[in-house]
């Protein structure tokens, strides 16, 4: 392996290019017409356009990506996450083209792409699973019988879905039929399948996931756990490692469960086994496996002191984990990650597009920034609006939290709205500070509101009025404002007096 084609964009493509360069490999970027000047293109040694802005015609265009690999002489493909990263047909096409696939073999993940099939694998590996039942018979009597065996409250879930889409909570029998019909409709539209199953709902569950690595020599290890309980509508908002509510025995048990599941399927590369942790029963239950690098992998890197992207590359070229992780894996300190999005949380988290007039990412000890954008870059409307991830490491959780808040206060993004104020508000929430959160906490606490966010439009309007000397205490008088031919000299935007707290300058 000498030249790696990165079949992705944004911060993860930049991150993978850096990993390639650490090992002396060349990195090839692919880009759409909308990303011609993107940062991930600049980070690579070569770049090839694979189509128009639409993902289906570019980043999901398998023939174009394989043609780019052939054109540049790449001998391996790294998929990052999202897009084609878990597409079994793409994996097989890469191997058929004579290229190295940097990830798990297709035969290892095909059997676990269905959630119900994955649960069966977990049970075979001795990994705990929550009570569940496949809904083969959708008659009222059969539904009720299955629900009574699982127990209320329960979740109706698509067998072939992900990301929380289609999931419906049911608290009593009278609501079961409507939940099943709704889940079938959403699942068919989103995933092309209306197959469902039900699973017992765990109240106030913590989302704990285990980072695993497997090599081509049959060795599988875990790299400890992360907690991702702060979620908005099943989408992760804050991620951290370790999970500080686990006892040492509970940590050992959940990490071994993750390793055992990966070993059961013959997993190769980096992956994540996800669990729900029940704080009342002090038990964990298998949820699913993500067969790729995760967005939140940097928090694991921070606490174990290893480079997971470099590990992926070394595994793909046949090296043993004993050599890659010489000395083993241990946890040290605490790390927290947040994702910076170009979005307007006060307006339903609407994605933002535009030119980044000025960007200043934090630069501080024990703070890491994985960014896909810099000053002057354009944020296209066609893709996920994540701009960067900011990760802070500390001696303990509170140290990491304070460092992350300081880093967010230093962050400057002009040109689009971002979720930075919301993240600062969440990190200061008493329940988060006390680590008393769960997967439903954020939605229960704030509903559809965005913490820490005022109306951006209202703020802009007030600033414009103030600058024009119109209305409010910043204008000398309404009469002056009405007759003035220019800005009022009484407002701080145009005053040139050099005001100082101790007196006139």
Image (spheres, rainbow, N blue to C red):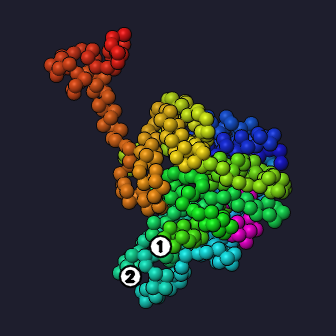
The reply to whether residue 54 is in sight is no
Horizontal arrangement in the rendering, residue 18 relative to residue 233 (left or right): right
Q: Give the residue at x 16% y 22%.
A: 478
Q: Name the residue under label 1.
A: 201
Residue 179 — which label?
none
Label 2 residue SS: helix
Between the C-alphas of marks 2 and 1, the distance is: 14 Å
Horizontal arrangement in the rendering, residue 70 relative to residue 232 (left or right): right
Viewer-nearest residue: 45 or 146: 146
- Crowdedness near tag 1: few (<14), some (14–19) or many (≥20) residues, C-alpha within 10 Å: many
Badge nearest the viewer, 2 or 1 = 1
For this orientation, the residue located farthest to the left is 479
Q: Give the residue at x 47% y 61%.
A: 438
Q: Quadrant of residue 115?
A: bottom right
User: Where residue 412 appears, x then y in whole percent?
Assistant: 49, 32
User: Where residue 402 appears, x then y in whole percent?
Assistant: 51, 41
Say if 20 sits above or below 480 in the image: below
The boundaries of the magenta stretch are 258-271
Q: Give yes or no for residue 269 being in the magenta stretch.
A: yes
Q: Give the residue at x 59% y 75%.
A: 129
User: Where residue 439 appears, x then y in whole percent?
Assistant: 47, 61
Q: Give the residue at x 45% y 75%.
A: 154
Q: Quadrant of residue 35?
A: top right
Viewer-nearest residue: 45 or 316: 316
Q: Name the residue under label 2.
A: 173
User: Is mark 2 in CB contact (under 8 Å) with mark 1?
Assistant: no
């Amino acid at each position: 392996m000498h030249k790696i084609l990165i079949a992705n964009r944004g911060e993860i493509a930049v991150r993978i290019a850096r990993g390639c360069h650490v090992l002396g490999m060349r990195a090839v970027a692919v880009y759409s017409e909308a990303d011609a000047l993107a940062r991930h293109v600049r980070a690579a040694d070569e770049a090839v356009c694979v189509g128009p802005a639409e993902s289906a015609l570019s980043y999901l265009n398998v023939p174009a990506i394989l043609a780019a690999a052939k054109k540049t002489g790449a001998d391996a493909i790294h998929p990052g996450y999202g897009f084609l990263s878990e597409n079994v047909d793409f994996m097989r096409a890469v191997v058929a083209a004579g290229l190295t696939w940097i990830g798990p073999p297709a035969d290892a993940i095909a059997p676990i792409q269905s959630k119900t099939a994955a649960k069966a694998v977990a049970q075979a590996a001795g990994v705990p699973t929550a009570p569940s039942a496949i809904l083969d018979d959708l008659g009222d009597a059969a539904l009720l019988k299955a629900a009574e065996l699982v127990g209320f409250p329960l979740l109706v879930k698509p067998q072939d879905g992900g990301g929380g889409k289609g999931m419906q909570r049911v608290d009593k029998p009278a609501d079961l039929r409507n939940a099943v019909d709704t889940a079938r409709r959403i699942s068919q539209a989103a995933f092309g399948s209306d197959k469902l199953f039900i699973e017992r709902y765990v109240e106030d569950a913590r989302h704990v996931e285990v980072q695993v690595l497997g090599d081509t020599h049959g060795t599988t290890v875990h790299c400890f756990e992360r907690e991702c309980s702060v979620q908005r509508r099943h989408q992760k908002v804050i991620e951290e490692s370790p999970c500080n509510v686990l006892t040492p025995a509970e940590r050992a048990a959940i990490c071994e469960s993750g390793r055992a599941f990966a070993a059961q399927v013959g997993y190769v590369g980096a992956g994540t086994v996800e669990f729900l942790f029940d704080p009342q029963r002090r038990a964990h239950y298998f949820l699913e496996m993500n067969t790729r690098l995760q967005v939140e992998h940097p928090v694991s890197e921070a606490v174990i002191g290893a480079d997971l992207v470099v590990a992926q590359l070394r595994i793909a070229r046949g090296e043993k984990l004993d050599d890659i992780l010489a000395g083993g894996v241990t946890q040290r300190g605490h790390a927290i990650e947040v994702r910076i999005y170009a979005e307007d949380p006060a307006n339903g988290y609407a994605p933002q597009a535009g030119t980044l007039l000025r960007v200043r990412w934090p630069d501080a000890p024990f703070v890491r920034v994985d960014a896909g954008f810099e000053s002057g870059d354009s944020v296209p409307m066609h893709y996920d609006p994540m701009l960067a991830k900011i990760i802070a490491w500390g001696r303990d959780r509170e140290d990491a939290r304070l460092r992350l808040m300081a880093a967010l206060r230093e962050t400057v993004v002009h040109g689009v709205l971002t979720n930075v104020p919301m993240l600062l508000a969440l990190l200061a929430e008493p329940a988060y500070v006390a680590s008393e959160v769960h997967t439903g906490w954020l939605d229960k606490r704030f509903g559809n509101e965005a913490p820490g966010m005022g109306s951006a439009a209202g703020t802009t309007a007030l600033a414009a009025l103030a600058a024009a000397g119109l209305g409010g205490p910043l204008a000398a008088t309404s009469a002056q404002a009405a007759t003035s031919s220019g800005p009022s000299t009484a407002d701080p935007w145009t005053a040139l007096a050099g005001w100082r707290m101790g007196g006139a300058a």
